[in-house]
Amino acid sequence: MPVLQVKKVFASLPQVERGVSKIIGGDPKGNNFLYTNGKCVVIRNIDNPAIADIYTEHAHQVVVAKYAPSGFYIASGDVSGKLRIWDTTQKEHLLKYEYQPFAGKIKDLAWTEDSKRIAVVGEGREKFGAVFLWDSGSSVGEITGHNKVINSVDMKQTRPYRLATGSDDNCAAFFEGPPFKFKFTLSDHTRFVNCVRFSPDGNRFATASADGQIFVYDGKTGEKVCALGGGKAHDGGIYAISWSPDSSQLLSASGDKTAKIWDVGANSIVNTFNMGSNVLDQQLGCLWQKDHLLTISLSGYINYLDKNNPNKPLRVIKGHSKSIQCLTVHKNGGKSYIYSGSNDENDGFSGKGHTNQVSRMAVDEMDQLVTCSMDDTVRYTNLSKRDYSGQDAVKMDVQPKCLAVGPGGYTVVLCIGQIVLMKDKKKCFAIDDLGYEPEAVAIHPTGSTAAVGGADGNVHLYSIQGTSLKSDDKTLEAKGPVTDLAYSHDGAFLAVCDANKVVTVFSVADGYAEHNVFYGHHAKVVCIAWSPDNEHFASGGMDMMVYVWTVSDPETRVKIPDAHRLHHVSGLAWLDEHTLVTTSHDASVKEWSISYN
């Protein structure tokens, strides 16, 4: 039996929106941090963020996730008001309890230090918060005193317990318990209160607001101690605060594109981190865990701050935060690089990139990444420089949707109702009256033939002759509208996948006679890729399955079920004979190792 395992997960970045704070949860043991993107909760190792785990059991978009202080469970809340409490110790992340504290978006949650009680707040219809026992759901108090959405909640981690909330009604509220009862309102802020946090030792709590102020209060009595910085703490709204483990300092993240560390006892600034000048450098979230200081930018990037050099982060984790449409692989100096394309402006390259979704990409023999996009251009990007230069964007008459590269500087681009031949980055030939809608294209490794798959269920063959493209008047019949096709690396076979769940392989040497037919997908097959060994190829479908097939034997196949749990696979590529890379609309990239016995 073939052996299959996941080698690496390149997880998606946090999903962020402007003007909304983003909560990063910390692990009480200090090893991991977690955040949400879409319906996923992403858990990453703080020392090595390439180690990631993705929890995908929510039916709706998840807003917040936090570890219980025991470290054994995570509670996560979504936009429908569902709170799921699930196990962190097993790979399966078994669901322990599920509650619906109120009907509406959950915006924040907090545990008591014994991991027995949970407070949940957000946009309820009748009430904006609830506090209850984690194992029975029975109420241990009421969260009242606000007349608008509650953005933030925290509980004192030492007895006697206290609870604080911050709301869009510009107020914070203070509660004593359990059972938790409303004590009084703190109306020092003049704008929305975005974040409230108790210090780990319970002596203080701080509130941060869109008015740029941070107030510090006594953790036990709720009396005001001071305003950090005397007046305004930041020039812009403050979205998040996080205490140092020893409770002496506070990290704040602001829309003024800075993060600051405060010495709370002395009421002074220790560090100011300037994160940039672009609007995407606004800071929406932060976490202080052990020696790590993390912030989240509006770009979705995760920054590790350096106390010794406030102007340059120690490291920045980049990636995708929106769905990935395509990918390709490139070997350079013995190292393999994976390139993935999406419609978030990810900064893998310098310069201005595509302004819309990237639909297809390939690497040509001059080590250029060739991409086509819904912004109606085809771009050539030099991979050794990794620079999007303006000269190398070629405008198309109509929107391009697929391309293939061949030897000799040729690129064949499929636009809506049109096939364009390009040589050396210039358009040299176009065919308009096709009589069918082209969907996918591949160029034979010799560079002589282009195979174009159509929505009419046929593959049309064209000869590349100098600067023109001539129809061979030969069509191969697929089993349904063609969705993707690919030549094997040695040019012996052409594999075609279609909307009728079938993959057909044609033998090139035998005049494109049908060689084998492969059944197994339960839904439309959308992408296909050949292994470098020319004996195996992989296909990905709308059924969320990836199959690795053997050309000579349709019965022998490796099945990767649920490769990406929530979304179908949108792209496949092989790093080597035993390593397959998959990507998906869940914005993550996964690397699989496959061995055949």
Image: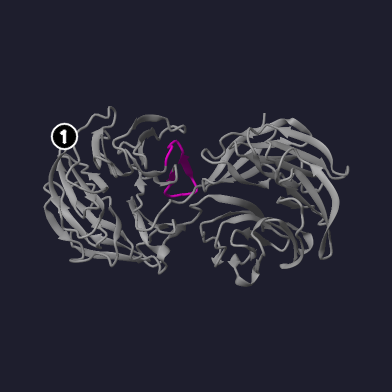
What is the x, y in percent for residue 454?
Answer: 73, 48
Q: Does the magenta stretch include residue 126?
A: no
Quadrant (top left/top right/bottom left/bottom right) for the N terminus: top right
Membership of 56 in magenta stretch:
yes
Residue 588, position in %: x, y?
Answer: 53, 47
Colour pattern of the rendering: one colour
Quick check: 458 left or right of 203?
right
Q: Which amino acid does label 1 sit on?
A: Pro
The residue depicted at 51 percent of the width and 57 percent of the height is 344
Q: As drawn, is 116 to the left or to the right of 505?
A: left
- Determine the secondary structure under disc 1: loop
- Viewer-side residue, 26 vs 451: 451
Q: In which quarter of the image is the C terminus?
A: top right
Corner quadrant of residue 507: top right
Q: Label 1 belongs to which residue?
A: 179
Q: Find residue 337 and report its image quarter.
A: bottom right
Residue 28 location (% of width, % of height): 33, 42
128 or 224: which is nearer to us? 128
Residue shown at the point (16%, 39%) measured from the top left: 159
Specify start and end residues of the magenta stretch as a single range.
Answer: 41-60
Q: In this view, does 95 lie above or below 242?
A: above
Between 122 and 65, the one nearer to me in the picture: 122
Residue 87 percent location from the top left of the image: 39, 33
Q: Can residue 424 be seen in this view?
A: no
